[in-house]
Every structure is written in structure tokens, then in C-alpha cells.
Image: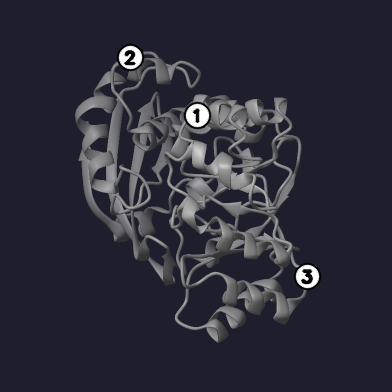
Amino acid sequence: MRIERIELRKVALPLVSPFTTSFGSVTLKEIGLVAVYSDGVVGWGECAALPDPIYSPEYTDGALAVLERYLAPRLLGRDVTAANVSNLFTGIVGHRMAKGALEMAVIDAELRAAGRSFASYLGVTRARVPAGVSVGIMDTIPQLVEAVGGYLAEGYRRIKLKIKPGWDLAPVAAIREAFGDEVPLQVDANTAYTLGDAAHLAKLDRFGLLLIEQPLGEEDLRQHALLARQVLTPICLDESVVSPEAAADAIAMRATSVINIKAARVGGYLAAVKVHDIARANGIPVWCGGMVETGLGRRANAALAGLPGFTLVGDVSASSRFYSQDLTEPVEMVDGHIAVPQGPGIGPAPLPDVLAAVTMQAVAL
């Protein structure tokens, strides 16, 4: 497939409500989009980086700059396939989210041209995956209880609570008291604690949580291994797993017993499959994390979550969880599940009118 043209866009979509974690709040998602053109086919990719470098070193404007100056030019005028596009990035260090977005666009174009679905490409046979929801830090516990009650009423199959020092034991206790021990519940600290908090984190054991996600710093694999010996709740890594190699190291060090796979974080969906395969070979369950994606990334995540190693409910939620108007046709939840897309490519392309309305800047290469 010869890449004839590449367009980069920055779009902005307001969230239905602020999404607050231990590292800050997001009210407007600025998103980098990539469109690749080849023989009348357009493939779309989404860069999941946040507007600011608070989750990872990458951020929207920086990712777009790297795409424009370094990554996209390497594809222009060349014959590429989804399987080998990452080889063209050799020599560009890091910037996994930017690379993943461009790779996603190539995958989408290749599959659209072939009339083949992303699920088929990945070897996924499931028609749907269970939907879970991530609930941010709120001003009061009654607000949190009301929000969780609403998500459960909608049909979500698993609740994840964002936590930080000062917002952990009491919120979790309130959710357990309000909804019982049967609700699948986990917490996500986004690196907010240190190993010195081990005794405090161990107090979460009494709540029967599925896991504690990324309690310590992203580079603290040894400390996570030590923490795992001091708590009963399984430790799950997110920010620490930036590549298949990092996943293998974390497993070997016994720093994790569960992995949250975010395709954007590890460099794209093909790298995400490698992480899945490594974890499955080692008996480590995985689940699919989210980065407040639009319908583009949300549908790709649904397909990824259909692989057999994804045995835990992920953050694959409906568009309405974050957006009143999605960039694409909305992703709907039915009976607590999200459908795995079966049409050509990764899923529906952006709606032209919506895309025009939310575009902040565009560059054609």
C-alpha cells in the first residue's frame, strides 16, 4: 500500500463531566488524529496522549509535532504494510503514542482496502466484550456513591475507582457499603503512593478488590515487587508497562500479577498483542485500559479486548461515558457489553460535520 498523503489534525471534544485522577483533571480532551491516504482509501488513527504530560511524557501538541516532523515523512511515497510500518520508525526514540497513532491509521487503511475487520486481523472470535467504567475522584463521597449507582444501573459490569492519598479507604468503604461485596471493584492510584504507604494500602485488602492498579511510580518495579509481598490484593501495572519488554521484566520480577494493556502506551495495537501474548504465556491475566478515546480508539480497544488473554473486564465503555457528541457514530453499550466491530477497518470513520466543527488545526503532508 503506497502512502500518497497524510493529514494531521488536532481536535477538541468537551467531556460530559470533569474526569479527575491523582495527577489532575481533564475537562476538554484535545486529540491528535492521523489520516493516511492510499489509492482512494482513507485510514484513521487516534493519538491517545493527554493535552498535558501528566500521565506520560507525551502530550497532544508534542505528539503532533513529532508526527509532522519525524514520523509521517518516513511513510510518504513508500509502500508499507501494517506489519512493517513500525520498522520505518527505527532511530526515533520513544514517542510510542505518536507511533501507535500512525500505525493505527495504516492498519485501518489496509483493512478497509481489503474489506476486512480489525477483529478478523487480530484473530478475535468474540462478538462482544463486557463493559467496565472508570470513576474519577469527586468532591464528596455522596457524589461518588450516586455516580457509581448510576453506572451500575446502566449495566456496567465492573467499577474502577480512582484513588489518591486522602481519597482511598473511605470512598471504597462507602461503595462496598452501598452496593455490597458482589460488585466487581478495583482501584487505580496512577502512581500516587510510595512503598512507605504499604501498611496503609494493605488496609484495602478487607474490601475484596480485584486489584490495585499502579500504586507506585512507573519506574518502581522493584518497589512494586516488595509491595506485592505486603498486601493481599493483586498488584496491577499500567504506567510501568511501556513495551512488551517492560511487561516481561515486570512479570519476571514478580512486580505484577495483572497487567492493564493500553495500546497507545506500548506503541500501538500490534505491540499490545505482543504484551497480551507474553502475559498469557506466563499465566498473567490482562484487561484493556482506556485513555478517554473517541469512537475510533474505543472500537479498536473493543476488538483488542476480544483476545483470549483479556479475562478481566476492562475500561471499554460507551461513548456516553465521556462524550455527549462522539467524533464517530457513538459506541453503544447493550446488556453491559460493547460490540466488537465487524465492518471493514477498525470501525466507522469520523463524522464529517463533527470533524469539521471540532478541528482546531490541520496539516496536510
Side (left or right) of 182 relative to 55: right
Residue 78: mark in rendering: 2
In the rendering, at what x and y percent does residue 10 appear? 28, 49
337 or 329: nearer the viewer: 337
Q: Is residue 112 left or right of residue 14?
A: right
Q: Nearer the viewer, residue 344 or 223?
A: 223
- Quadrant position of residue 285: top right
Q: Is residue 293 visible?
A: no
Residue at the limit of the structure toward the right, as seen here: 182
> Residue drawn 76% across and 35% down?
125
In this rendering, position of residue 253 left or right of residue 267: right
Q: What's the residue at 42%, 39% (across, down)?
A: 219
Residue annotated with mark 1: 246
Residue 35 higher or lower than 338, as above or below: above
Q: Residue at x 71, y 25 (%)?
A: 281
Q: Earlier in the sequence, mark 1 or mark 2?
A: 2
Sequence-wise, which precedes: disc 1 or disc 3?
A: 3
Q: Amino acid at mark 3?
A: Asp
Q: Quadrant of the C terminus?
A: top left
Name the amino acid, label 2: Arg
Please give the residue where the numbered disc 3 appears in the rendered image: 181
